[in-house]
Image (cartoon, rainbow, N blue to C red):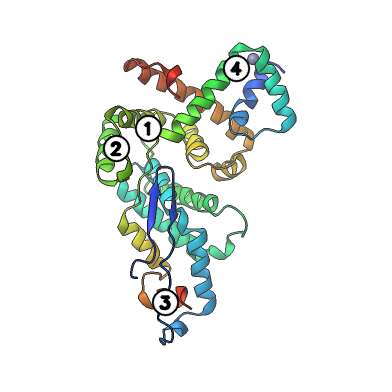
Amino acid sequence: MDCKTACVLMSAAVDGEISFTEEQDFLLHLSQCKRCREEFDDAKKTKMIIKERIIRFRAPQALITTIMQLTDFNTRETEETLLYE
Amino acid sequence: MWAIIRIHLEPGRFQIMDKPAPTHQTNIPTKKEALPREERQKQLEFQNEAVVHLHSLYNYALHITMNPDDAEDLVQETYLKAYRFFNSFERGTNCKAWLFKILKNNYINRFRKNSKEPGKVDYDLIKDFYHSIKDTRRDSSEADTDYFYSLLHEEVYQALLSLPEEFREVIQLCDIEGFTYEEIANMVDSPIGTVRSRLYRGRKLLRAQLEGYAKKYGLNTDNDQ
Ligand SMILES: [Zn+2]
């Protein structure tokens, strides 16, 4: 495998979207190529940073209520019907 | 007994907590008949399959609209449409992906209708937005994290927002929402190969941005996880 092919497979390798044989070839290339190895580590690190550092917001209560109303879950009668049948 | 659903949010995930255990209430003549059985089943299924993704949808809507009111509208529209067309949802497939696709289509239609171009990122606006929303809506369990950590949250967010939309989008869908390439390809109407290369290039751009911030604050990125 050359660097160009390795680059094509880079994100797929980070995300586990790569076939077993592709991965074998890819890892073999990394073991021989410092540049691609570093790039692979960087890509993995970048993914992890995004995953861990982006704050997830709580949806506003009004929105939750609206969505629940959509399926009539807000009414007491419906609740009893659905949950305590 | 009134609040039947409590939604609990942890960073990165949420779930609907257990419903309260049934108490007494046995032979109360309820208004069962008011709602056909199929409709009730549809509601239950919709709740289990679709409503559980409410927080994810809201976060995604926030990211693409950069406006809490628009985000709410968008999510609401999405659920309305999803409920109406719930029969066309292919059972066994990823409902979250299905909902995201609807949301994205809604978003595109709305922008087209208003002939509003998604504008350039205004960093001051983002900063204000991020701070205001962080103060009011941030999960309290994170309230005591130190200043540096929350600053980094913001820097990462800004770095992400600075990317061209086509790159930002796939990174959000992949790294934040955890969709597969196939699901993302379907959402962005592009082949899997395109998703793959956008992720590759997007992460490289992002890396460069983050390194810029890190240098600014004298951080060593190599030690940063
Ligand atoms: Zn190489």
How many numbered circles are shown? 4
* Crowding at mark 4 (Cα within 10 Å: few <14, some 14-19, many 20+): some
Q: Is mark 4 within 8 Å of ligand 1?
A: yes
Residue B56 x/y as whole percent: 44, 48
Which label sits in the foreground, 1 or 3? Answer: 3
Give the Cα separation between the discs numbered 1 and 3: 43 Å
Badge 3 or badge 4: first in the primary sequence: 4
Labels 1, 4: one chain: no
Q: Chain of mark 3?
A: A
**Residue drawn at point x = 60 percent, y = 17 percent:** A37
Q: Is mark 1 within 8 Å of ligand 1?
A: no
Which label sits in the foreground, 1 or 4? Answer: 4
Find disc 1 in the rendering and name its residue. Answer: B157
Asked if the residues shown at circle 1 and circle 4 are in contact, with their CB atoms under 8 angstroms apart, the answer is no
Residue B130 is marked as 2
Asked if the residues shown at circle 2 and circle 1 are in contact, with their CB atoms under 8 angstroms apart, the answer is yes
